Image (cartoon, rainbow, N blue to C red):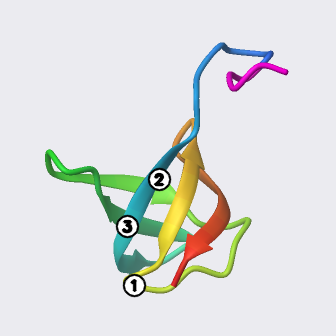
Amino acid sequence: MSERCTTCGDVAVPLRVTELLPDGLALADTGAGSEEISVALVEARPGDTVLVHAKEAIAVIGR
């Protein structure tokens, strides 16, 4: 089984949510700065680590 998305070939990466924004968005720490991601599919809060694929959080993997 592949660890890559069969549609786009990308991988999901763990990021830490630093701030929740309106409309199901959040800021996440990439280690090199902040990136805006969607958290519409998960119940994330600041400090949570989420698994992100194509700027969409698909799972909360750490609180």
**Residue at (63% x, 70% y) in the render:** 60
Mark linked to residue 19 = none
The Cα–Cα distance between marks 2 and 1, rounded to whole angstroms, is: 14 Å
Where does label 3 land, which residue? 16
The Cα–Cα distance between marks 3 and 1, rounded to whole angstroms, is: 8 Å
Where does label 1 land, which residue? 46
The Cα–Cα distance between marks 2 and 3, rounded to whole angstroms, is: 7 Å
User: Would you call the spot at circle 2 few (<14 residues within 10 Å), some (14-19), or many (20 or more)?
Assistant: some
What is the quadrant of the N terminus in the image? top right
Q: Amino acid at mark 2?
A: Pro
Q: Which residues are magenta?
A: 1-5
Q: Is residue 21 left or right of residue 60?
A: left
Q: Magenta stretch: residue 9 in it?
A: no
As helix, strand or loop, the secondary structure at mark 1 comes to loop
**Residue at (15% x, 51% y) in the render:** 33
Q: Are marks 2 and 3 in contact (CB under 8 Å)?
A: yes
**Residue at (69% x, 26% y) in the render:** 3
User: Would you call the spot at circle 3 few (<14 residues within 10 Å), some (14-19), or many (20 or more)?
Assistant: many
Q: Amino acid at mark 1?
A: Pro
